[in-house]
Amino acid sequence: AQTVTQSQPEMSVQEAETVTLSCTYDTSESDYYLFWYKQPPSRQMILVIRQEAYKQQNATENRFSVNFQKAAKSFSLKISDSQLGDAAMYFCAYRILTQGGSEKLVFGKGTKLTVNP
Amino acid sequence: NAGVTQTPKFQVLKTGQSMTLQCAQDMNHEYMSWYRQDPGMGLRLIHYSVGAGITDQGEVPNGYNVSRSTTEDFPLRLLSAAPSQTSVYFCASTAGRRSGYTFGSGTRLTVV
């Protein structure tokens, strides 16, 4: 079964500090996509960053960056200079093809990030 | 550009009642899907559609029906609501594998 594991149910960080959220996944595919989604209390799912498996370079979006280690099937999210607005649930997700040529996102169970002032 | 619109945002049902959660997108995306979110479980796929007239089951389809008569709309039907269907429901769409997913704002459903 295709799975995504987020081993940290909760994390906390001091404002302006750096925090890393971990994610591992299981797949036999060579071409796939990985995502980090942020879900603030508003409930909206917001795409933070994505990584194509065929790209060796780690994706970066402003203060957010990933450490993608394909061989280890690891996809961690680093948030630099943490801000109060970063407090949210963070979900790691993996995009896979289903039988018949369709696709779906498989989500981890999430990490709740608290930012302390 | 509205993106993905879900209605209603909140709903309370009695056990055994039926209802339809609406989802509409204006981005001409072929692929649409429904997820449910439960505490400690992440998001799980209920049903999905790769285009008008084509639907298929996801990970947790029991108790839900879907149809896709147009590209824009993908309603989710609960025929006989059960307390186990208390959850937050998200509709999402995408233009394809190299594109991101756009999520609706979710529907919080409580079945009493």
Image (tube, coloured by chain):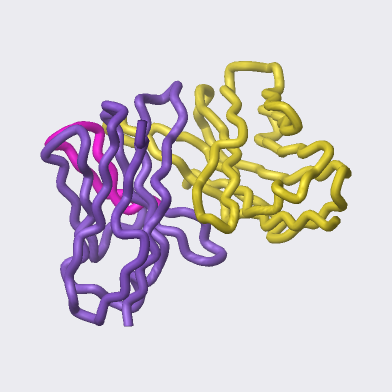
Which of the 4 image quarters holds residue A99?
A: top left
Residue range (magenta)? B45-58
In this view, the residue in front, A54 or A78, is A78
Residue found 19% across the figure and 66% down from its top: B19
Left or right of B107 in this view: B26: left
Q: Residue at x 57, y 42 (%)?
A: A37
Q: Quadrant of the N terminus of chain B?
A: top left
**Colour yellow belongs to chain:** A
At x 32%, y 83%, the residue is B112
Residue A109 falls inside the magenta stretch: no
User: Residue B33: x percent and y percent?
Assistant: 32, 43
Q: Identify the residue at horizontal 32%, vertical 77% (top origin).
A: B111
Res B7 quadrant in image: bottom left
Quick check: B36 left or right of A82?
Answer: left
Q: Pick the residue in front: B37 or B61.
A: B37
The front one of B39 and A63 is A63
Q: Is residue B84 left or right of residue A115?
A: left
Image coordinates for residue A110, horizontal then vertical, percent:
61, 54
Chain for colour purple: B
Position of residue A34 relative to residue A20, above or below, is above
